[in-house]
């Protein structure tokens, strides 16, 4: 079954490759008509920790490597860093003290892989890549994802650091174990790349909302919510309150807006306004935060959030690796 699927992908890859270079060419022409040059390769990712992740991704992109490899290896830097408290090793646990991780990855052929509520594996993004490449499925969760990862050779690791245990115990004193919306600790890494061939890929990985109910899964491993892309159009990823992003399929909405001609910034803004309007009567409305990041086929990008504070890292050959503040709706 897996073999047949791979064979099919291999055969159809010719068609897809031919089609995507055609599309890339058309996009290049369109942009040249307007007197602009297509910016590629380029990689963008959410928050400050995006800088180190971009630097890793750039090693691949700058040597004409594939976007899919760049977005996988790039976010692994944040997953391995215990100082990044919202992703991978050292991430904040759920309210029972378990670190549970969510991740997904998507390539230029719209192939994708995802894991959710994965414990004791440091690199959920690499497991998601294996789900994509080596199974006929898109998503594995919980113990199933864990056993799959172990079968593929990923080591069992304790991801709860001393710092996370301390913070969790402090939280327990104040919060009395109540499930509450926690807006201070939403810092998923989402990464989008356009490679030298003009192909796009994206990745998203997180420990999710701090102090969540055990078993809670956010938007980050959900294709269409935390991440979506269409290689003919562009790619979008999300950070912030995952429940709000899932309710509105925000990444899909923003990709579809780009298809209609919106710039990445306009698409993010419109999708954020949609989230705000859909939560007008929601109990979370007064502290709701979501940030969206988008990249289109021409290498144009933009980020927009509900409230101030969202930033993202951009790396290309022209201006190197830098941080930019996103625009926002509620001043
Ligand atoms: N979106 C993630 C989630 O809700 C959290 C985050 O962005 O930090 O799980």
Image (cartoon, helix red, strand yellow):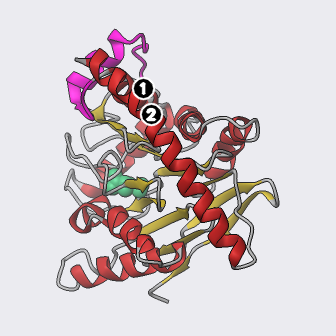
Q: Nearer the viewer, residue 319 or 263?
A: 263
Q: Residue at x 52, y 72 (%)?
A: 264
Q: Residues within 10 Å of mark 1 (few under 14, many from 20)?
A: few
Q: Residue at x 19, y 40 (%)?
A: 215
- Report x, y in % for residue 249: 27, 64
| Residue position for label 2 | 13
Q: Residue at x 55, y 62 (%)?
A: 295
Viewer-nearest residue: 41 or 245:
41
Residue reaching furthest to the bottom? 331
Label 2 sits on a secondary structure element that is helix
Evaluate if marks 1 and 2 touch, with contact meaning CB atoms under 8 Å apart.
yes
Depth check, front residue: 102 or 126: 126
**Residue at (38%, 12%) from the top-left corner?**
152
**Residue 112 image position (x, y, % from top left):** 36, 39
Query: Residue 204, percent across and down?
Result: 44, 46
What label does residue 10 carry, if any? Answer: 1
Q: Does the stretch in magenta take in 138? A: yes
Q: Residue 226, percent across and down?
A: 36, 55
The answer to whether residue 252 is left or right of residue 232 is: left
- For residue 295, the mark is none
In terms of image quadrants, where is residue 26? Answer: bottom right
Residue 8 seen in the current view: yes
The stretch of residues the image draws in magenta is 136-159
Inter-mark Cα distance, 1 to 2: 5 Å
């Amino acid at each position: 079954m897996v073999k047949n699927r791979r064979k099919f992908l291999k055969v159809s890859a010719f068609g897809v490759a031919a089609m995507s270079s055609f599309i890339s060419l058309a996009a290049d022409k369109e942009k040249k008509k307007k007197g602009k040059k297509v910016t590629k390769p380029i990689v963008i990712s959410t928050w400050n920790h995006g800088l180190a992740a971009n630097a890793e991704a750039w090693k691949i992109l700058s040597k004409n490597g594939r976007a899919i490899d760049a977005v996988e290896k790039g976010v692994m830097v944040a997953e391995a860093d215990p100082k990044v408290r919202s992703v991978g090793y050292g991430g904040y646990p759920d309210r029972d003290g378990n670190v549970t991780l969510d991740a997904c990855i998507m390539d230029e052929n719209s192939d994708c892989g995802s894991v959710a509520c994965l414990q004791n594996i440091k690199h959920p993004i690499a497991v998601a890549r294996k789900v994509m490449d080596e199974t006929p499925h898109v998503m594995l969760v919980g113990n199933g994802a864990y056993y799959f990862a172990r079968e593929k050779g990923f080591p069992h690791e304790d991801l709860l650091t001393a710092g996370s245990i301390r913070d969790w115990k402090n939280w327990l004193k104040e919060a009395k174990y109540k499930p509450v919306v926690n807006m201070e600790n939403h810092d998923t890494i989402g990464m989008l790349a356009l490679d030298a061939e003009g192909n796009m890929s994206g990745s998203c990985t997180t420990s999710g909302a701090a102090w969540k109910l055990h078993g809670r899964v956010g938007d980050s491993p959900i294709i269409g919510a935390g991440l979506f892309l269409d290689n003919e159009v562009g790619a979008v990823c999300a950070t912030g309150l995952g429940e709000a992003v899932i309710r509105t399929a925000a990444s899909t909405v923003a990709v579809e807006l780009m298809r209609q001609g919106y710039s990445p910034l306009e698409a993010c803004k419109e999708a954020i306004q949609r989230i705000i309007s859909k939560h007008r009567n929601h109990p979370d409305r007064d502290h709701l935060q979501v940030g969206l990041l988008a990249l289109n086929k021409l290498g144009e990008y933009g980020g927009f959030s509900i409230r101030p504070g969202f930033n993202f890292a951009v790396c290309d050959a022209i201006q190197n690796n830098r941080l930019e503040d996103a625009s926002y709706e509620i001043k």
